[in-house]
Image: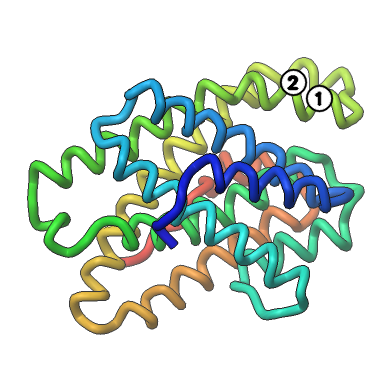
Amino acid sequence: MTEGSIPALLDRMRAELATLGGAQRYFHSVYLRTTEAVAAEIERGGFADGDWVRRWDLAFATLYLDALDADRAGRPVSRPWQVTFAAARDRPEMPPLQHVLLGLNAHINFDLPQALIAVISPDDFDDAAILRSRDADHRHVDVVLQARVSAEARELGAVSRVGLLDRLLRPANRAASRKFLAEARAKVWHNTRVLDQARRASSYDAVLADLERLCADRVRDLVAPGPVLLKLARRGFGVRLPR
């Protein structure tokens, strides 16, 4: 979906949050606040093409919200979201940050390339000026999200038990989060270009299935026992399709 308005999207997200309980609230709350931040940046005129960012934001958020609704209704969802939603139900004792990272991983690595493909046509990819504008706005979203890292750390700290080691590592965690977001979005842009080539070659579904498998494997790795940030430091946040 690329039609609609950001205020209507935010109303839907707030309504969904009111019905969620337990670990499902962690990612949803973070995503709601970051969507509000992107909306404010659009209103401020911070993007080169605010109307395009609006359409992209709607397409992106709808992929998550539709997956959430499908899962709650017992309908099939993609494998990255299967793992993420199952962890929220079955592993509520995991730290809130870990649940947030699962949702971010599924949404950024799997949903974001699809959202970009929905709002960047093959002709746009072939127009160097338009593509530079889209790339610049894509990277500027990083700036908006990175500005939220410290605030989100405080929000998560308010709903979880924070030990001495966590407090000592907090500045490093924030720096790592910024690094992971930048690394993931660079890979997302690569994967979007691969998907664009695939849709031109009528192999989009097959390549998207490869992306789904890679993303599900990465989310499963983050659910497995062991320090999540160390896993991300070792293997990276994003996934990369072969050209």
Question: What x and y, as percent, mark residue 116?
Answer: 35, 55
SS class of the residue under badge 2? helix
Residue at numbered disc 2: 154
Q: Quadrant of the N terminus?
A: bottom left
**Left or right: 232 as drawn, with respect to 53:** right
Q: Is 224 displayed left or right of 162 in the figure?
A: left
User: Which of 198/18 is in front?
Assistant: 18
Density class for disc 1 (Cα within 10 Å; few <14, some 14-19, many ≥20) is: some
Mark 1: secondary structure? helix
Looking at the image, is 148 positioned above or below residue 50? above
Mark 2 crowd level (few <14, some 14–19, many ≥20, 10 Å Cα):
few
| Residue at 81%, 46% in the rendered image | 18
* Up/down of 129 relative to 3, above or below: above
Q: Residue at x 79, y 51 (%)?
A: 24
Give amino acid for label 2.
Answer: Arg
Q: Position of residue 123 (x, y in %)?
A: 12, 61
Q: Which mark is residue 36?
A: none
Colour mapping used in the image: rainbow
At x 44%, y 56%, the residue is 59
Q: Quadrant of residue 54?
A: top left
Say which of 2 and 96 sits in front.
2
Hey, what amino acid is under mark 1?
A: Gly
Figure check: 146 above or below 196: above
Give the x, y percent position of residue 16.
73, 52
The residue pinned by badge 1 equals 157
Q: Quadrant of residue 153?
A: top right
Query: What residue is shown at x 81% (from left), y 25% (from top)?
Result: 157
Q: Quadrant of the C terminus?
A: bottom left
Q: Are marks 1 and 2 in contact (CB under 8 Å)?
A: yes
Towards the viewer: 232 or 139: 139
Label 1 to label 2, Cα distance in Å?
Answer: 5 Å
Percent of width and height locating residue 178 = 51, 29
